[in-house]
Image (tube, helix red, strand yellow):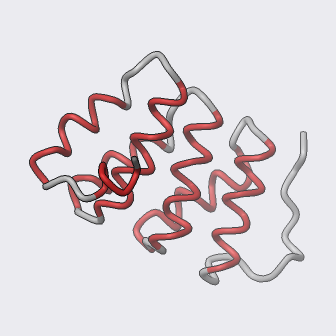
Amino acid sequence: MLRVLSALPAAAVPALALALTSPRVSTRVLAVDALARMRSAAATAHVTAALDDADPAVRGAAVFAFGRLGSAGVAARLLSMCEVDADAGVRRRAAAVCRRYGWIAGPSRTVDAR
């Protein structure tokens, strides 16, 4: 299903972005993944907005997506999430992405498990 969604034309971005407003977390996670796979500036902007979602599963999906994309434009945001996100899993995932791309040095930086 993701392969089909990610192969949609750029004109489908607004519909997928609308899915980010769904009350269902699973729908929002799927939308983040599909938008990230589209690899367009408009789609990426919506994935960036998902970093602020109320649910940690959606924020985590967005962090994971940027881990695949390697978008340096969100480096500062992900660095911040390493320290201040309310969810320990999201903080760990953000730290892993930041380490992968060299935005923070090695595993010596601790991520507060709160």
Give x and y (percent) for residue 9.
Answer: 13, 55
Q: Residue furthest left?
A: 11
- Write the residue at 77% across / 46% down: 89
**Picture quadrant of residue 54:** top right
Please state which of residues 12 and 73 is positioned toward the viewer in this rendering.
12
**Picture quadrant of residue 102:** bottom right
On screen, residue 50 versus residue 106, left or right, reads left
- Write the residue at 45% across / 30% down: 27
On screen, residue 58 versus residue 21, left or right, reads right
- Write the residue at 64% across / 71% down: 98
Give x and y (percent) for residue 22.
Answer: 40, 21
**Picture quadrant of residue 42:** bottom left
Give x and y (percent) for residue 103.
Answer: 62, 77
- In the image, residue 29 above or below residue 104: above
Please state which of residues 22 and 51 is positioned toward the viewer in this rendering.
22
- Write the residue at 75% across / 82% down: 105
Quarter of the picture holding the C terminus:
top right
- In the image, residue 95 above or below residue 61: below
On screen, residue 97 versus residue 4, left or right, reads right
How many numbered marks have been drawn onto this rendered protein structure? 0
Give x and y (percent) for residue 47.
Answer: 39, 49
